[in-house]
Amino acid sequence: MTALLLSRRDTPAPVLAATALFGLVLGWATYALHGTVPFLERATNSVSTWIIWTAVAGALIRSRALAAWSGALMMVLTCAGYYTASAQGGTFGAGGLGTAAVWTAAGLAGGPLLGWAGWAVRRGPMSARPVAGAVVAMILLGEGLWLGPTLHYWGEATVFLAAGALLTAFLTVFLARAGVPRYWLCAVLAPVGGLLFHLAEKLVLAGLL
């Protein structure tokens, strides 16, 4: 879907509009799928699912700066889509503004990084590609650590950790086949990044709960 929306010529207006639209839809879907099929609810109501699409968008964009800007915009509009749907559904409580502000700030901080990471895996300097791949894969690994040791949702944690391991392996092989020097750093750094992401997520969520 995102690939169809993005302009081949990477002109800023269509690309930014496409990422903004996708973010709004993703945020709305997260709210709309609450209480429905468990798989779909978890697939959307997830930090890693929200931001992994940011890396996908970055990988489809040829301009580094535009990939970073699109990452920030997508994350902010995902938050906007979710909390707008929440307000319309009558579940936007008194503390909603503070929570929305925290997640928007987190999106502004992490969105450009993930947009850059997606871009760098395909088009960045050779030295940066293994690190970028690890940044992308660490999201799923970190989410798995949050769901397992912290929340004790071991079934879901296993799925996220397995998906993170598979993504790490895929990106490592992709980099190796592209002739990237020290491609193996992706596999080394992804688990370390996953642990750091888990700790950062825990810190943010602990402040919200």
Image: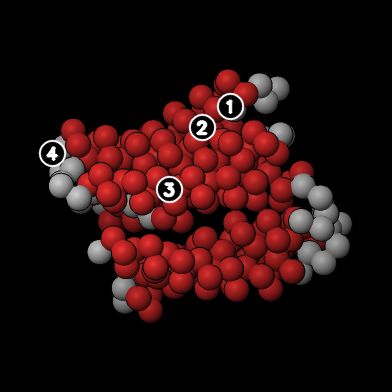
Q: Residue at x 86, y 62 (%)?
A: 181
Give the residue type that dot 4 points to.
Answer: Gly
Q: Residue at x 25, y 36 (%)?
A: 85
Residue placed farthest to the left in the image? 90
User: In the rendered image, which residue does mark 3 sit on?
Assistant: 105
Give the residue type that dot 1 points to.
Answer: Val
Q: Nearer the viewer, residue 57 or 198?
A: 198
User: In the rendered image, which residue does mark 2 sit on?
Assistant: 19
> Which element carries disc 1, helix, strand or loop?
helix
Tally of numbered tags: 4
User: In the rendered image, which residue does mark 1 sit on?
Assistant: 15
- Between marks 1 and 4, how big is the CA–CA gap? 32 Å
Compare marks 3 and 4 and give the one earlier in the sequence: 4
User: In the rendered image, which residue does mark 4 sit on?
Assistant: 90
Q: Which mark is residue 138?
A: none
Q: What crowding class fits label 4: few (fewer than 14 Cα within 10 Å), some (14-19), or many (20 or more)?
A: few
Question: Are dots 2 and 1 in contact, CB under 8 Å?
Answer: yes
Compare marks 1 and 3 and give the one earlier in the sequence: 1
Q: Nearer the viewer, residue 81 or 8?
A: 81
- Where is residue 14 shown, x and y percent of the image? 57, 21
Q: Residue at x 67, y 36 (%)?
A: 65
